Image (tube, rainbow, N blue to C red):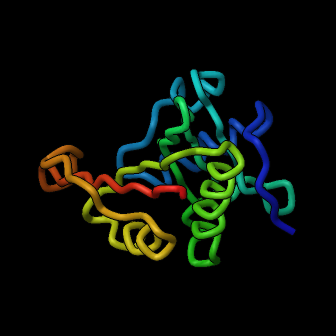
């Protein structure tokens, strides 16, 4: 059975192994292992004691930003991404957040569709923000407002 847990030291090696498989431009080891940064609220999705996904988030004065989210590519297509995003929203609600923010590569249409279906709205773009195989691509900035 899978469960969402706060990120702990024992998860870091597995998170670090997933990161380069899940992202074209992965976070560095030092970023992954910086678990005590200001406002940190990071979680993992564990199935049979194996990390299959995670998110890193930061809560600064009621504004929560989803900094990084990933599902191990060998476990994609099983609904884990949706579970992680829903857990992120639930965490925000429990923190009495006013808003949640994220950005997504414009080429990541699957993630964009998931975020939109859950209730995020596109509010802006950072033009040519992310490096890509063909140069640069836009970052779509999305928000979720809690009422």
The residue under the point 51% across, 71% down is 118
- Outermost residue toward the front in this view: 147
Please state the horizontal and vertical placement of residue 101, each as a whole percent of the image.
43, 48
The residue under the point 45% across, 58% down is 144
The image quadrant where one finds the N terminus is bottom right
The one of 15 and 94 positioned closer to us in this rendering: 94
The one of 16 and 78 positioned closer to us in this rendering: 78
The image quadrant where one finds the C terminus is bottom right
Please state the horizontal and vertical placement of residue 61, each as a whole percent of the image.
54, 30
Q: Is residue 119 above or below residue 102?
A: below
The one of 17 and 108 positioned closer to us in this rendering: 108
Please state the horizontal and vertical placement of residue 19, each as a whole percent of the image.
52, 46
Q: On the image, which quarter does residue 133 sit in?
A: bottom left
Q: Is residue 62 above or below residue 121?
A: above
From the viewer's perspective, tell me whether residue 21 is left or right of residue 88: left
Instruction: State the count of labels.
Output: 0
From the viewer's perspective, tell me whether residue 145 is left or right of residue 46: left
The residue under the point 80% across, 62% down is 47
Please state the horizontal and vertical placement of residue 6, each as a whole percent of the image.
76, 42
Q: Is residue 115 above or below residue 66?
A: below
Q: Is residue 129 above or below residue 75?
A: above
Q: On the image, which quarter does residue 36 sit in?
A: top right
The residue under the point 65% across, 40% down is 42
The one of 2 and 123 positioned closer to us in this rendering: 123
């Amino acid at each position: 059975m899978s469960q969402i847990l706060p990120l702990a030291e024992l998860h870091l090696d597995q998170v670090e192994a997933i990161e380069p498989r899940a992202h074209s431009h992965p976070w560095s080891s030092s970023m992954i292992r910086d678990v005590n940064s200001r406002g940190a609220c990071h979680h993992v999705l564990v199935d049979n004691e194996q990390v299959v996904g995670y998110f890193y988030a930061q809560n600064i004065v009621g504004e929560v930003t989803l900094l990084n989210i990933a599902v191990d590519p060998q476990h994609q297509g099983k609904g884990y991404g949706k579970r992680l995003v829903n857990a992120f929203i639930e965490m925000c609600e429990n923190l009495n957040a006013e808003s949640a923010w994220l950005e997504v590569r414009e080429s990541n249409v699957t993630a964009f569709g998931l975020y939109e279906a859950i209730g995020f709205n596109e509010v802006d773009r950072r033009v040519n923000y992310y490096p890509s195989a063909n140069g640069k691509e836009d970052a779509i900035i999305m928000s979720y407002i809690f009422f």
